[in-house]
Amino acid sequence: METSKIKILKFLTSFDIGGTERHVVNLLRGLDRSKFDVSMACLRRQGPFLKDIERLDIPVEEYSLGSFRSRRALQELFRCARWIRTNGVQIVHTYGFYSNVFGIPAAKLGGAPYAIASVRDTLEFPPVQSAVHKLVGRFADAIFVNADVIRRRLVAGGYNGAKIKVVKNGVDLSRFAPAARRTPLRSRLGWDDKFIVTYAGTHGMAHALDKVVDAAARLARRDDVRFLFVGEGAERRALEDKARSAGLDGVRFFGSVPRESMPEVYATADLCLVPLRKAELFTTVIPSKIFEIAAMERP
């Protein structure tokens, strides 16, 4: 006797390039479609990852709001609730502030047995938005986070800790296997034999990225260390100017890099830097590398 598939609705704001969007696509690729009947919903049907969803033959419903305060937003909320009820959705899983605020109430109105919200960053919102999101969190059956630090911050902010589950990101590590010392990217940079420190992301973390440029300046006298910034953002020009004025030849800035090229970027790097909070910089690749940075800063 064939077992009925579990009906799931995944909800994203859009399909633009981002860690959460990439996570959802990878999750859907690995989901056992013989056991799960999956649909997607979004607030904006746009972005490069939309093609990945369409290639997986997953239907996508768009709920275009304009503004959460508009009459249209309320109409779209009830339309989504009707779709959930009509299609017998059993699990609604939303990702990010806007999807959580829209999708969790729709799930409850639509009678879905389980509504799961996801918080995947430590961004701080204005008081009104924070209050709205916390209220929505009370209606969620569970809140999934991808790091212990996020769970701690939510609990400290008044969220119900019993609902919060830490589900860390699954990553296909084979795509980021350490490369041979001489790689095409190293050759293009002319850094075949250098120790490469890489930051990849949005250049909007001014205070944290300033620290990286300052570290590069302190290490400038070392001929074996190079810094590579990958990505765009509001602070890119200021960081480039700062590096140029300091006479740093060992710092390069790349703009946006196609996502299919990022495995080579990470594999080529000896150390990757990831800013998790506005005023702090953390290394997440190999913890022992932290001590190598400290050693390099000594005379």
Image (cartoon, rainbow, N blue to C red):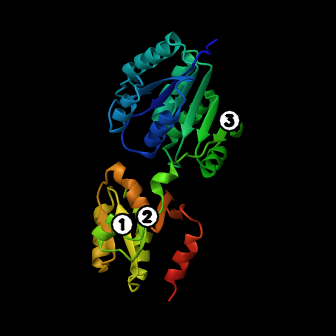
Q: Amino acid at mark 3?
A: Lys
Q: Which mark is residue 183?
A: 1
Task: Kindly state the secondary structure of the residue where label 1 is placed.
Answer: loop
Q: Are marks 1 and 2 in contact (CB under 8 Å)?
A: yes
Q: What is the distance, in whole Å, between disc 1 and disc 2 at their CAs? A: 7 Å
Does the rendering let one see residue 266? Answer: yes
Q: Which residue is mark 3?
A: 163
Q: Which residue is mark 2?
A: 179
State which tag comes first along the sequence, 2 or 3: 3
- Between tags 1 and 3, which lies in front? 1
Residue 97 at what x, y percent from top left? 49, 37
Residue 32 at what x, y percent from top left? 55, 29
Task: Kindly state the secondary structure of the residue where label 2 is placed.
Answer: loop
Q: From the viewer's side, name the closer residue of 44 and 75.
A: 44
User: Are there few (<14), some (14-19), or many (20+) residues within 10 Å of tag 3?
Assistant: some
| Residue 156 vertical placement versus 118 (above, below) | below
Residue 208 at what x, y percent from top left? 45, 64
Q: In this view, which residue lies farthest toward the right?
A: 162
- Please state if 11 lies on the left or on the right of 118 as rendered: left
Does the rendering let one see residue 201? Answer: no
